[in-house]
Image (tube, rainbow, N blue to C red):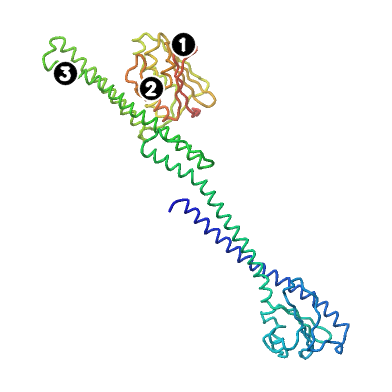
Amino acid sequence: MKLVHQINLAFGIALVLMLSVTAVVIHHVLLDHFMGAQKEELKTMSVAMTATLSQGSMSQMIPLDKTISLPATIYPATSVEAILTDKTGMVVSTSVPMDNIEIILGTSMTDISSLQNIWDGTDKRFITEVKATPQGTLTLLTPVSKVRAIEEALLKRLLIVFFVAGVLMFLFSLFITKKLIQPLMSLRIELKKVKERHFSDVKLIKAGGEIGSVAQSVYDMAGELKRFNHVQKQFFQNASHELKTPLMSISGYAEGIKDGIFEGDSVHKGLDIIMSESARLKNLVTEMTLLAKLDSEEDIFKTTEVCLKDLLIETIERMNPLLVKKGLNLHTTYDDHQPLMIRADRDKLLQALINVVSNATRYANQHIYIHAALKDGRVEISISDDGPGISEDLLPYLFHRFVKGKDGESGLGLAISRAIIERCEGLITAGNRPEGGAVISIGFHSSHRSNS
């Protein structure tokens, strides 16, 4: 069954149950109200009639075949009957002719046991009010059936109103349900496009509330999957290209040596190229494997308290041979007033910093600057150089995989650095200095703890 039909069926059942319970409650409330009002009316009438009878005498009473004139009640359709008995229980006078007594009471009015049942309240067919008078006992009674008839007539009118209101509410619910379900039906179509990997065809469904939020999430997810799919295809294309170049060199020189094309020193030169390209290939595969692990494996990171100053000192020591070889000067500044402590995987963060500094050595003319400080509760690191800077068209894609600058190598170094830093809940960005040269900024949440 479709969701729209399920909702309408559930609402219809709930509406019927609610109206049924309401009708039953109103039935009992109305009946209790009418019976209570009739009892109060009988009390008022009995007081007035008792006062009238007290002023008369037995000789002035109406004969048995006459009727007592009674005031109209508040319910014209409800008849009130009066019975006056003497002290022995015999009927002295009544508001109806004697030949109608059996019809009213279902027994002879002269039957004392019947009047006794009315006086005791055990006869549930009547609403009664019994009042003592100087002549005997005045009994006023109204048949319950007539009160019920009034209540049922009013209830029928209310039920008609309820039925019309229920139908209108159900029709309105159909309209509202359609308005609510329509975005969901459209959203299902868009999700089907996602399932079939047609990410470019996914449209944003306009809706309000939680459905609108879900629709926006689906649209954003489709965009992210589209980007990821593109990046994945680009990754395999670039990886194939990067792997193909050293493999072609290795294959070419190996075949030349085997076929005797190279002789003497050319053989040694060819072997050196094979060894160099094999090392490059190994390094590339290692970086690709690490990047895949950073994306997929949760337990690859072992976070601990790391002193950033010690980590930067070790990074400089690792890079010092390369700095000396290229004749570069490295300048470092630290905020020594507060300890720079963060939570991270020390070895992997060391590798990320080495990758960033190594990238700076490729483009620096003479100087590289490293600055670390605590700012607004965050540990900020900036690594800059005095080189030509990063081109504007390359800047948005600098940390993507296989994106290489002019003198870049595999194009995976900065991508690995970004993956490591983000796994350490940090943020890495790139830009250019106003005075020239590139700057890469890294930020972490501080884990400040004193050494005491």
Q: Which residue is mark 1?
A: 436
Q: Nearer the viewer, residue 192 or 326?
A: 192
Mark sitting earlier along the chain (2/3): 3
Mark sitting earlier along the chain (2/1): 2
Figure check: 184 above or below 230? below
Q: Nearer the viewer, residue 208 or 371?
A: 208
Crowding near the residue tagged with mark 1, few <14, some 14–19, many ≥20 C-alpha atoms within 10 Å: some
Q: Which residue is mark 2?
A: 414
Crowding near the residue tagged with mark 3, few <14, some 14–19, many ≥20 C-alpha atoms within 10 Å: some
Please tell me whether mark 1 sits on a helix, a strand or a loop. Answer: loop
Taking the image as shown, residue 22 lies to the left or right of residue 129, namely left
- Name the residue: 81% across, 80% down: 69
Q: Residue 390: x, y in percent?
A: 42, 15
Mark sitting earlier along the chain (1/3): 3
Q: Which residue is mark 3?
A: 254
Q: What amino acid type should be assigned to the residue bearing mark 1?
A: Gly
Please tell me whether mark 2 sits on a helix, a strand or a loop. Answer: helix
Q: What amino acid type should be assigned to the residue bearing mark 2?
A: Leu
